[in-house]
Image (cartoon, helix red, strand yellow):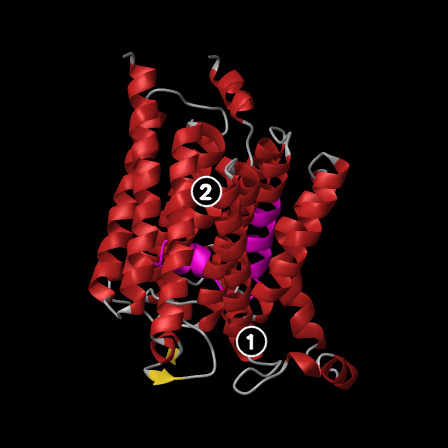
């Protein structure tokens, strides 16, 4: 077995292992075992960076220099910001959010450019995600009150023990996408029927979270998947760019119109107990206000009150406010180039569904920043969709096999 074959085997095992960690995280959240959730996050972090270091030492792509610049500048800006602020508990916990962000970036790079995953491993990954859906179904029907816990009390929103229903909503959106992929990927009719049933229950669970952005993303997922499958080609550069920028565009427009009386009347159906239309206003306005004082290096320390732990409830705003406009520009450039690269290797229905799912998860980030600042492993489920968006033959051709 040559070095390339050994690396492929190692990457396949670690990818399956990372998805296994997601399953453990889901179970741990339900049983409120925070220490196990943290342990799984740290384990996934080391696994991802091991993959990155191992592959980088053997094959360096032109684009990787931009990735190194993004990583280095993010770290430098956080350190400079802390020195200027003169406050903050400098320690591992202070840098934990930064580590989450960089882990997401590195994982996305790996699945877009370096991953070479066999059909067998992809099947294992789908089985793991379907198993998560089965676990959620079992949890719901055996202990519904436990599934509705929010801040220690039984609420009207489905959380499955996670910190908030918006995060649960994105998890259910991811599971929904994997179930749909499985419907078209599995050849056995019984397996397809199981996947279809789980897709239905996952959509129902997503509805029970009342996570508005995730629900909108679910509808858009099916619309985007249908459009790409009918056209038999992915979206072009302009549409792809707009979809990737959607969370920040949404945030800016929201701040401009949310207190317009006509808008409030038209969108009143989206309001519910504890979820008014203006719930994000103060948080986002404050984030922009603090960011405006140090736009180049960001306000990692200030927006977290010196703790390093903050959540701007919007992926793009979180990156912009935490690390500055230069890092944000590099991040968006990275995201666009990686997505367009993967789009160039779409040629079947499963690829289009996975790509539509990835766009939907980015859109869902309009109201939840867990992708770049959460420790629940959501980046694995979202980034993994880029694997399924690539045709296997295209990956082999890229690797020169």
Q: Residue 22 in the image: x percent, y percent?
A: 34, 52
Q: Residue at x 33, y 17 (%)?
A: 5
Q: Residue furthest front?
A: 190
Q: Which residues are magenta?
A: 356-377
Q: Is residue 330 visible?
A: no
Q: Residue at x 40, y 44 (%)?
A: 127
Q: Secondary structure at mark 2?
A: helix
Q: Residue at x 55, y 80 (%)?
A: 279
Q: Residue 161 in the image: x percent, y percent?
A: 35, 71
Describe residue 110's horizontal placement relative to residue 359 as left or right.
left
- Identify which residue, 240 or 99, lies in the foreground: 240
Q: Residue 159 in the image: x percent, y percent?
A: 41, 72
Q: Residue at x 48, y 13 (%)?
A: 400
Residue beneath disc 1: 280
Q: Secondary structure at mark 1?
A: loop
- Identify which residue, 30 or 395, lies in the foreground: 30
Describe residue 2's horizontal placement relative to residue 353 as left or right.
left
Q: Is residue 146 above or below residue 217?
A: below
Residue beneath disc 2: 384
Numbered label attached to residue 359 = none
Mark closest to the chain's N terminus, 1 or 2: 1
- Identify which residue, 314 or 211, lies in the foreground: 211
């Amino acid at each position: 077995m040559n070095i390339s074959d050994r690396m492929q085997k190692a990457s396949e095992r670690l990818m399956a292992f990372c998805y296994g960690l997601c399953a453990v995280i889901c179970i741990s959240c339900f049983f409120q075992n925070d220490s196990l959730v943290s342990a799984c996050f740290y384990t996934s972090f080391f696994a991802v960076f091991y993959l990155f270091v191992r592959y980088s030492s053997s094959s360096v792509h032109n684009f990787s220099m931009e990735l190194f610049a993004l990583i280095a500048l993010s770290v430098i800006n956080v350190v400079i910001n802390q020195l200027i602020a003169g406050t903050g508990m400098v320690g591992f916990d202070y840098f934990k959010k930064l580590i989450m962000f960089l882990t997401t970036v590195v994982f996305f790079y790996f699945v877009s450019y370096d991953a070479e995953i066999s059909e067998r491993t992809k099947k294992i990954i789908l089985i793991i995600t379907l198993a998560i859906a089965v676990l959620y179904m079992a949890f719901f029907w055996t202990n519904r009150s436990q599934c509705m816990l929010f801040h220690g009390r039984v609420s009207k929103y489905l959380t499955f023990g996670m910190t908030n229903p918006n995060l649960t909503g994105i998890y259910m959106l991811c599971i929904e996408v994997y179930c749909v992929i499985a419907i078209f990927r599995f050849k056995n009719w019984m397996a397809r029927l199981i996947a279809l049933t789980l897709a239905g229950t996952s959509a129902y669970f997503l509805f029970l979270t009342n996570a508005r952005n995730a629900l909108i993303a679910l509808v858009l997922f099916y619309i985007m998947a249908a459009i790409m499958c009918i056209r038999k080609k992915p979206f072009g550069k302009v549409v792809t760019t707009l979809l990737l920028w959607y969370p920040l565009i949404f945030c800016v427009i929201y701040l401009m119109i949310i207190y317009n009386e006509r808008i409030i009347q038209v969108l009143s159906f989206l309001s519910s107990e504890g979820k008014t239309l203006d719930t994000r206003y103060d948080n986002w306005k404050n984030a922009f206000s603090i960011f405006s004082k140090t736009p180049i290096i960001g306000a990692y320390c200030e927006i977290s009150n010196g703790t390093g732990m903050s959540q701007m409830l919007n992926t793009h705003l979180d990156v912009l406010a935490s690390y500055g406009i230069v890092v944000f520009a590099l991040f968006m450039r990275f995201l666009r180039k990686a997505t367009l690269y993967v789009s160039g290797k779409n040629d079947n229905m499963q690829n289009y569904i996975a790509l539509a799912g990835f766009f939907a998860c980015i859109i869902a980030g309009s109201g939840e920043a867990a992708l770049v600042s959460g420790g629940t492993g959501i980046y694995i489920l979202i980034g993994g969709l880029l694997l399924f968006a690539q045709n296997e033959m295209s990956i082999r051709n890229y690797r020169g096999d």
